[in-house]
Image (tube, helix red, strand yellow):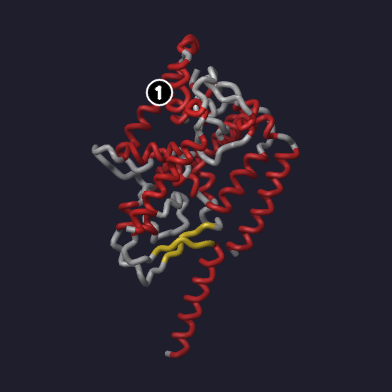
């Protein structure tokens, strides 16, 4: 059962990962990360 | 001797990962910028590490998740990232890579009044995780980063203000709230084992969900166990691993495995664990048949 769940979730998360790459969400992450996050520093 | 070496190797991994995820100013002191802005920021680190920290070269996954939700997008990349890591190694990053967890373990070594937190409070991190999804999506606020995260205060807020005092002009009540939470965090980290990881960390909450089905597992042999309690003493999360080897709070540090005097605990994987259960069932059936 656990083995089956492992493979099912592996496929699901792999699809999510590929979809995120196709949607270029890493560009959004880059845009958040390259400036000081004023929320994070509490200002 | 080998057990001691194994325990100290985790410390080395923790130091190495701190240096790996945070080398910016240390490697580049003449850069003149107080924040790394290169392409590495497109990648998330698998642990809690504020991307506004002057040392950080990667992005914080929970911060990026909330910012993506703020844009009304489904953070599929980050969910896939969390899921893939969790499926393979569960909470292993918490125990071995997270600099914030390492910092808490050092704080706990300070000799001061100590106490244990009740099990029920450990589920608070799931409330925080839920709010970290809902508040950014519906109210456009990064709930965890803005109102809670002490990592942001300690790793980013204080160094950024020291490097650039002009930022103090923008100070608001949120800053004082975060400073208060950071002070409480330090107090609880001294008095309780990995308080933040147990009670508040949404990243640990996500990885913890995968402990049951992750590839990396701990195998427990009840026949060898003497219930001496050493595993709980050495556990940085203060759990009884022999009660549940897939506990949501097990950070796979393997201190218990390395310290068990009767070798009742072993590092294993999900496929091997199943085989052991099947074998023990077979033995029981066989014995029953003989009787």
Pointer 1 residue = B179
**In the displayed structure, would residue B225 be above or below residue B190?**
below
Is residue B39 something that shows in the picture? yes
The location of residue B68, given as percent across then percent down, is: 64, 31
**In the displayed structure, would residue B32 be above or below residue A15?**
above
Q: Which of B86 and B260 is in front in this view?
A: B260
The location of residue A34, given as percent across then percent down, is: 61, 24
Taking the view exactly as shown, the residue that stands out farthest to the right is A22
The location of residue B216, given as percent across then percent down, is: 52, 57
Q: Callout 1: few (<14), some (14-19), or many (20+) C-alpha neighbours within 10 Å?
A: many
Left or right: B87 as drawn, with respect to B111: right
Residue at point 49%, 22% (across, down): B29
* SS at mark 1 in the image: helix
Residue at point 34%, 35% (across, down): B188
**Residue A31 placement: quadrant:** top right
**In the displayed structure, would residue B2 be above or below residue B287?**
above
């Amino acid at each position: 059962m656990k083995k089956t769940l492992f493979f099912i979730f592996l496929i699901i998360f792999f699809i999510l990962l590929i979809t995120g790459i196709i949607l270029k969400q890493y560009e959004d992450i880059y845009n958040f990360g390259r400036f000081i996050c004023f929320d994070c520093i509490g200002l | 001797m080998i057990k001691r070496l194994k325990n100290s190797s985790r410390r080395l991994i923790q130091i190495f990962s701190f240096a790996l995820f945070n080398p910016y100013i240390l490697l580049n002191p003449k850069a003149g910028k107080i924040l790394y802005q290169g392409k590495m920021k497109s990648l998330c680190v698998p642990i809690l590490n504020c991307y506004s920290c002057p040392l950080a070269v990667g992005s914080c996954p929970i911060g990026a998740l909330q910012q993506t939700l703020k844009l009304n997008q489904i953070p599929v990349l980050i969910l896939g990232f969390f899921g893939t890591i969790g499926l393979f190694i569960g909470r292993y990053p918490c125990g071995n890579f997270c600099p914030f967890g390492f910092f808490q373990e050092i704080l706990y070594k300070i000799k001061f009044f100590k106490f244990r937190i009740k099990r029920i409070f450990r589920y608070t991190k799931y409330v925080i995780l839920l709010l970290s999804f809902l508040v950014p999506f519906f109210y456009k606020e990064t709930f965890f980063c803005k109102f809670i995260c002490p990592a942001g205060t300690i790793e980013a807020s204080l160094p950024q203000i020291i490097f650039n005092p002009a930022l103090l002009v923008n100070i608001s009540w949120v800053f004082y709230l975060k400073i208060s939470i950071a002070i409480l965090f330090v107090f609880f980290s001294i008095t309780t084992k990995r308080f933040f990881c147990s009670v508040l960390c949404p990243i640990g909450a996500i990885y913890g969900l995968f402990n049951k089905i992750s590839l990396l597992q701990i195998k427990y042999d009840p026949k060898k166990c003497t219930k001496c309690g050493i595993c709980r003493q050495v556990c940085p999360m203060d759990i009884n691993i022999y009660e549940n080897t897939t506990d949501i709070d097990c950070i796979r540090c393997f201190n218990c495995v390395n310290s068990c005097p009767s070798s009742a605990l072993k590092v294993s994987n999900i496929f091997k664990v199943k085989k052991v259960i099947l074998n023990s069932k077979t033995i029981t059936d066989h014995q029953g048949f003989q009787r």
